[in-house]
Amino acid sequence: MRSIVFGAALFTLGAASLAQADPSAGIWQTAPGESGGYLHVSIAPCGEQLCGTILRAYGPDGTQVADYEHQGKPIIWNMGRDGDGRYSGGTIWAPDTDKTYRSKMQLKGAQLTVSGCVGPFCRSQDWQRLK
């Protein structure tokens, strides 16, 4: 019985290590929105997919907005890995418009291009890696 539990624990740790090794995992700075403010977003594995959570918000002058109402909320979920730095099948939420979009991402070095579409209308941003 111990060997089964030990084996299951090793498998779980191994799977978690593989998931954490995803190259897009980390902390990203969004492009400035229409108001000039931007966010820091943490992207991490959530099961077999990737999810993003809003860590902090900053005003146009770069000052942290301590009481940002959406801090800690999910901004990306169910993002599937396609390989070669491409991701699709996810959903992204735009806090500035309170709309959700079909989403995909593409990683190129320290830049993550994140796009979302509703019907034929799409918007995208280039996010910069912080960590």
Image (cartoon, rainbow, N blue to C red):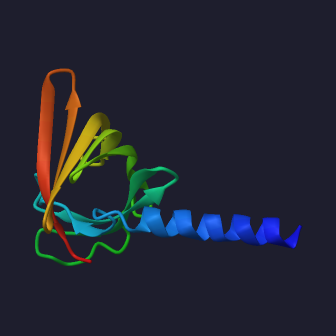
Near-viewer residue (52 or 7): 7
Q: Residue at x 35, y 40 (%)?
A: 90
- Horizontal arrangement in the rendering, residue 91 relative to residue 6 (left or right): left
Q: Residue at x 28, y 34 (%)?
A: 101
Instruction: Report whether residue 59 is seen.
Output: yes
The residue at the point 13 percent across, 44 percent down is 124
Screen quadrant of the C terminus: bottom left
Q: Is residue 33 visible?
A: no
x, y percent for residue 125: 12, 51
Q: In percent of the image, x 54 and y 62: which residue is there?
A: 15
Q: How many marks?
A: 0
Would residue 50 appear left or right of 118 to someone viewing this image?
right
Pick the front one: 70 or 22: 22
Residue 3 x, y percent position in the rendering: 81, 71
Where's residue 71, x and y in %?
A: 40, 63
Q: Is residue 23 left or right of residue 77?
A: left
Image quadrant holding the N terminus, namely bottom right
Expressed as whole percent of the image width and height from the top left, the position of residue 127 reads 16, 61
Residue 88's place in the image compared with 18, above or below, is above
